[in-house]
Amino acid sequence: MDGKDYSIMSILPPYNNLHAQLIDRQSGKQVTSGVTLSYESLRDPSGSINTSSAGKTNFWQYVKALYGGAPAPNRGLNLSNPAVSNPTPSTQPAAMSYNQVQSWYEAEGLPILPYDDTLTSNGYNKNYYPMVKVVAKSSTGTVLASTQTVLPVSDEMTCISCHASNSNKDAAKPPLRGWANYSADPEKDWKKNVLRLHDYKHANDPVYQAALLKLQPVAAAGLAQ
């Protein structure tokens, strides 16, 4: 995912998938009905826990302009079924649904971030492997099984090495308008430089001109090369 800022452009939204299968130990067969599966945040052995994404990023402020959907804070996009908006794992168990085509229980589009709930002087503590617990219950609420897993997530995908202002990398020549030199936020700085290069190359493109009039951030997947 892109990190904390979505006000300029986005490469990837916060988006993680959780899949699970329940096996009857006696028959060895998969259990596909008469049970419910849920997921929730879990504190890992180091003490790190991640129970919320809202407030750690401005994603929900710009999600509609970027991706067309409008999930509530701490709710994610869902490419498989836009009608279902799954929540960030929290201390409150959230239901998983059964996918008959894939033969698994799933929670897709979880808007998990690599920042746990511990706020330090440098921002939220990073944890690229937030832990969750999956619980299976019978129709009467009896716990049948549970397991622990992690939802790998990272903000390390960045173009800062080549596109940071005053970069010496040959791969990214300075935009003709000059570097953005936005020292207040390095993340915004390289994104501004990427868009400056793009805008110069496509200044006369009608599609670009129409997009420019919208005055909104851009989903990078739709940028012309």
Image (spheres, grey):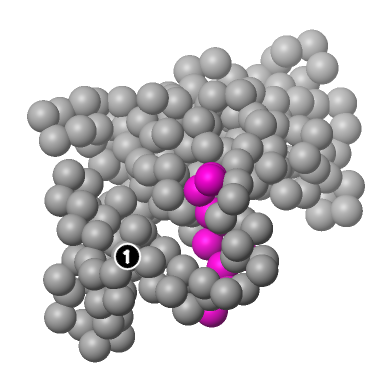
Please say whether residue 43 is visible from this viewpoint.
no
> For the residue marked with disc 1, what is the amino acid?
Asn
Residue closest to the far front:
204
Residue 115 lies in the magenta-colored region: no
Bounds of the magenta segment: 215-225
Where residue 58 sits in the image (x, y, percent)?
Answer: 42, 34
Where residue 8 sits in the image (x, y, percent)?
Answer: 42, 49
User: With respect to residue 10, does 24 lie above or below?
Assistant: above
- The answer to which quarter of the image holds residue 56 is top left
Badge 1 density bin: few <14, some 14–19, many ≥20, Cα 10 Å: many
What's the residue at 80%, 26% (across, down)? 35
User: With respect to residue 52, does 197 lie above or below?
Assistant: below
User: With respect to residue 170, does 218 lie above or below?
Assistant: above
Residue 218 lies in the magenta-colored region: yes
Where residue 197 sits in the image (x, y, percent)?
Answer: 39, 73
- The answer to which quarter of the image holds residue 173 is bottom left
Residue closest to the far bottom:
170
User: With respect to residue 185, does 161 lie above or below?
Assistant: below
| Helix, strand or loop status at disc 1 | helix
Residue named by callout 1: 193
* In-image side of 205 versus 61 (left or right): right
What's the residue at 32%, 65% (across, down)? 193
Q: Nearer the viewer, residue 153 or 19?
A: 153
Please say whether residue 189 is visible from this viewpoint.
yes
What's the residue at 50%, 31% (across, down)? 61
* In-image side of 129 versus 212 (left or right): left
Where residue 170 sits in the image (x, y, percent)?
Answer: 24, 88
